[in-house]
Image (tube, grey):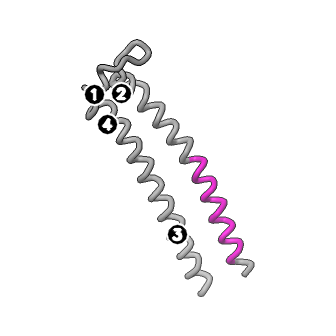
Amino acid sequence: MEQQKTLDERQRWYWRKNIRFILGLLAVWAIVAYGGAILFAEPLSNIQFFGVSLAFWIAQQGSILVFFSLILIYAIRMDRLDKEYARLLKNDKEG
């Protein structure tokens, strides 16, 4: 019964870290997507980037590139978290 309690604590730890990380990534994406393309569109319109306004470029290309980057970052970070979780479970079983 004691082992089940430890497993539940580890699971809560894992999901807290996972959810916190997801919320951070979503915040970055929202700031880039809405901030760069909508909220700051007027000041960014005066800046030329690859022949178009920076606001247009962020709305059409930049937010997509940020989204793909966030997917890559998430995959790498979750791989590390999964390995750390597996190590913690292994240590619990051995100890």
The location of residue 61, given as percent across then percent down, is 43, 25
Q: Which of the 4 image quarters holds residue 94?
A: bottom right
Mark identifier at residue 41 = 1
Are dots 3 and 2 in contact, CB under 8 Å? no
- Distance CA(mark 3)–CA(mark 1): 40 Å
Mark identifier at residue 35 = 4
Give the labeled residue for mark 2.
59
Q: Is residue 77 left or right of residue 45?
A: right
Instruction: Identify residue type, mark 3.
Output: Trp
Q: Is residue 32 left or right of residue 38?
A: right
Q: Which of the 4 image quarters holds residue 63?
A: top left
Q: What secondary structure do most residues of the magenta stretch adopt?
A: helix
Say whether disc 2 or disc 1 marks the residue closer to the N-terminus.
1
Instruction: Identify residue type, mark 1.
Output: Ala
Report if residue 80 lies within the magenta region.
yes
Are dots 2 and 1 in contact, CB under 8 Å? yes
Magenta span: 75-92
